[in-house]
Image (spheres, helix red, strand yellow):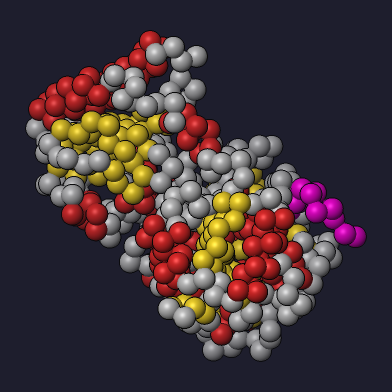
Amino acid sequence: MAARRDARYAFDGLPLGPVDPGTSVIVTGPVLDGARELGLRLLRCDVGDCGVVIITTDSGAATTMEDFERYGGTFDRDRVGVVDCAQDGREPAADCVSAVGTPADLTGIGIEYSGHYERLYAAGYERVRTGILTATPLLVYSEDVRPVYRFLNTVTGRIDTAGGVGVCVVDPKAHDEQVVESLVQCFDGRVHVRSGDEGLELRVDGLPDQPTDWTAVDPSA
Amino acid sequence: MTNDSPTVLCADPDDASRAATVDSLASAGLAVREAASVSDLESTLDDGVDCVVTAFEFGDGDGFDAVDAVRAANPDCVCVLFTDREPSDLPRGAPEQVVEYVPKPADGSRDRLASVVATAAAETRHAAYPLPDGEAERLAAVRQYDVASLSAAETFDRLTALIASHFDIDVAFVGLVDEHEERFIACEGANWRTLAREDSICTHTILTDELVVVEDVREDPRFAAVDALDELDIRSYAGARVTDDAGNALGAVCCTDGEPRRYSRAELDDLRRFADEVEEQLRLRRQLAGAP
């Protein structure tokens, strides 16, 4: 069933309330122990009119799409676009995947991202979820953090004006705390993730009607 | 954005194509300027332009040369590459040339371009720094503080002289953070007038109600690559945010030095008191000037 363009975005199976179109969040936590999984689960959309664009920087496109499907996403080539900055030699041959040689090429990543967004829009997908998985290589490969701010402001600006939803994953332990705090400022809200005794847990800052205390994530949902 | 109707500069060497784009953007309610070359664009640009829509091929350069010219004149300006070339066919630019991209359709339609540009020009900025929440309200608040008309300059000159002496530092200043740059309204120990926001540490100070201390700029990944700080001999920094009654961040009261430096808790408390004094002076003088 098609969702209205101005309808809020829901996150089925996650203990999160819906968010307004145009919302971007940063997901902070250990990438291999929950944050990447949660980022991919936030990109799931079960309604048929929703597109997905993923900028993958730390795993190749094939690996990322396998992970996306493992966490409940559907790799439908007509409504998915992938910007692959971390080619691992097993990229799927598909028009929906474009390669950028290095995470340092923020200009190339931005243009390929916009190109996918426009391709999906032209195909009728007006509701698009964007994922940046993860921001760590963008920061590591950039000698200067200022172009990364510009890149994130440009991507979140596109998400805001197009009425999409955005998710950017970063491991705070991989970076200076002040850098992470300044990145957070580029987003509407922050989803903290940790691996607790009972499994994955999350809490949210900066967005209304979301859990502010640590809340368990149902792994089977 | 300071105008109700955003201003867009359309750069395209093809007269017919440029005219079609200009018509489409104007129909979307935008104020439109034109340029037929990169050099035209350079001479037409100013900080009143909210967005540049550029073709990729020019007689005197390419789209990335156009973006370079935009960043030099108006660093936060939204740039949109509008071309019939596929993303993969475009040469890669430098990291600071991050742009929006809208493909030029074969049927010549500009509807999608106009839609993207109208919202991007009005609502976004390609800033190379984090923006505070409520930036539009904050900028409106800053515009209320014309320090010359408030006759506050001499007071702030005395305060910054006192701060520099108290902390035994090279430079003390009071800066207001405008849309594109920080404006130093008092500066003891240097003759600074403005600094681009992407180069200014105060850009980060206005994000938080906590004091910001950078003991060694060269060791802080946010600032180590900022040449302007090196050129101004800013090796260490401490700053306290200044706000108005509504909580809008106007700017900061700051200490800088040419050597790495630590600040004790007592020193930071003193810096906060100096910033409180600046806030109070601004508030009282606005009231004296008859502001609501």
Q: In this view, does B196 lie above or below B280?
A: below
Q: Is residue B52 above or below residue A70?
A: above
* Residue A22 visible to an observer of this rendering: yes
Q: Nearer the viewer, residue B221 or B4?
A: B4
Report the side of A23 relative to A137 (left or right).
right
Q: Which residue is drawn at 36% across and 51% down?
A: B198
Q: Position of residue B140 (x, y in %)?
A: 50, 32
Q: Nearer the viewer, residue B163 or A208?
A: B163
Instruction: Give the residue at the far front of this rendering.
Output: B15
Q: Which residue is drawn at 45% across and 67% down?
A: B40
Q: In this view, does B274 lie above or below A16?
A: above
Q: Position of residue A62 (x, y in %)?
A: 62, 81
Q: Position of residue A184 (x, y in %)?
A: 49, 48
Q: Where is residue B267 in the image (x, y as percent from the top left)?
A: 19, 28
Q: Nearer the viewer, residue A88 or B192?
A: B192
> In the rendered image, which quarter is residue B225 located in?
bottom left
Report the side of A3 relative to A34 (left or right).
right
> In the rendered image, which quarter is residue A96 located in?
bottom right
Where are the magenta residues, as a range?
A: A1-11
Q: Does the magenta stretch include residue A5?
A: yes
Q: Does the magenta stretch include residue B88?
A: no
Q: Residue at x 54, y 75 (%)?
A: B13
